[in-house]
Amino acid sequence: THKGMSQFHGSLGGSREQKNRLSICNKLCYAVGGAPYQITGCALGFFLQIYLLDVAQLDPFSASIILFVGRAWDAITDPTIGFLVSRSPWTRFGRMLPWIVFSTPLAVVSYFLIWYVPVFEDGRVIWYLVFYCLFQTLQTCFHVPYSALTMFISEDQKERDSATAYRMTVEVLGTVIGTAVQGQIVGMASAPCIPTPGDNVTVDGLNSSLLLGQEKTAYNVASGAICSIYVLCAVVLFFGVKEKKESSRSRSQRMSFWQGIRLVMGHGPYVKLVMGFLFTSLAFMLLEGNFALFCCYTLGLRNDFQNILLVIMLAAMLTIPFWQWFLTKFGKKTAVYIGTSSVIPFMLLVVCVKSNLIITYMVSFAAGVGVAAAFLLPWSMLPDVVDDFQVQNPESQGHEAIFYSFYVFFTKFASGISLGISTLSLDFAGYITRGCTQPENVDITLKVLVSAAPIGLILIGLVIFRSYPIDEERRQGNRKLLQDSKLF
């Protein structure tokens, strides 16, 4: 009978495998849903700061408030929406998909209005604050359910991992599309700079305001293009993915926000993972947020910066499969060390060498390789921590979403602080809106923001990773334990 039992389990496992198989089409449709978040995030990350300063012509202090409050608000909405989603009832389309459908039209409108310069000047700060925060909220109503959807498209971990790999590829493609659409359209119309007293440049005032008008239009066209891609992706996701009701897991117990924090913060490996990634992702966010200004002013590559940004994202997209291979071959911890630290020599190079287009392209390619690692690794390591938690707390079920949403919460909050502080520091350094040249202090500040500060943050992050306890052996052990417990 024992042999019969094991055969029965074998066939049960087989039929379950069959039922859980996702077609390539399902995986692609699921993956496409990840693009809007990355496309809009990339456009905002690279261009919002330079847009608020040079096109909407806000002073750096106001811009820093918008950037900080927008990101911090975004961070707060994450866990909140996470809780609302986990408590929302099951509909015939599932529990996650209705959120995605209803938030899309409003998100698109508010996104478009972020890139619109209103005629009045007095209330501009309020305008950008309101629409930026509104967009972040609606974007969260799309992205939190989408992230949690991974758990509901299949019960088989292999299938989920495979779908996640598809999603990662499309998301990185999204960052390239966002950078390309925004950068190339905006790059075609760049208004001339305004000479400062020491410059020997003359600018025709009438022509200048005409060109500024063209630049505003270019931003509108770019945001219109991104909005239509956003809607298209939501439609593909809705019609191409079926949400499955979970059978093997009970519904998660209801938890308050603070219980959630206590739960995730009580799990050591999670805290170390999140703290480590907090510092490394902050480093890349500082680089991202200030790189456009750094290219325009410190390197003087005003006409090339959109192409330089594109090279970073293309490099990231092309090297993700390499990192995927690398982490399966050498383990995830090694991948974190090598991947994140590979950027450091190039960050030093770009600051130490006099402005040189070829070297800048080389550096941006190398930065892209690091961005790929920084992008892929947190998402491939979070499931290991969730598994570890489940092995140690078998009675506590269905808390995956909390682990994910708090990770996103911490990174977003930190990015708000970093962007706010970096724009504020430009204010102190004496940044001149649309200036042909900037004071020396602004150059020094930009060098610190794209080189010294990120390197320091990366090193702190790597030190924290030294103490991260889940190595390959423990990870495989956890996986085996969980699969055994799921069979019975």
Image (cartoon, helix red, strand yellow):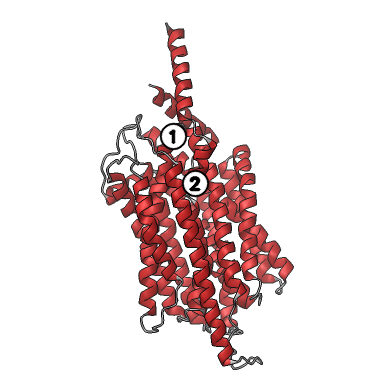
Q: Note whether 390 is above or below 287 in the view shown.
A: above
Position in image of residue 237 (x %, y %): 45, 46
Question: What residue sits right under mark 2 in the picture?
Answer: 379
Could you say whether the residue bearing mark 1 is in a helix, strand or loop?
A: loop
Q: Which residue is painted at 56% across and 92% down in the image?
A: 205
- Horizontal side of 353 relative to 62 (left or right) equals right
Could you say whether the residue bearing mark 2 is in a helix, strand or loop?
A: helix
Give the Cα distance between marks 1 and 2.
18 Å
Quarter of the view holding residue 155? top left
Nearer the observer: mark 1 or 2; the answer is: 1
Position in image of residue 429 (x %, y %): 52, 81
Q: Quadrant of the N terminus?
A: top left
User: Amino acid type of disc 2?
Assistant: Trp
Is residue 468 shown to the viewer in this render?
no
Q: Note whether 274 is above or below 13 in the view shown.
A: below
Nearer the observer, 75 or 226: 226
Is residue 295 shown to the viewer in this render?
yes
- Horizontal side of 206 relative to 395 (left or right) equals right
- Horizontal side of 341 relative to 480 (left or right) equals right
User: Amino acid type of disc 1?
Assistant: Ser
Q: Quadrant of the C terminus?
A: top left
Position in image of residue 400 (x %, y %): 38, 42
- Horizontal side of 392 relative to 29 (left or right) equals left
Q: Earlier in the sequence, mark 1 or mark 2?
A: 1
Question: What residue sits right under mark 1 in the picture?
Answer: 154
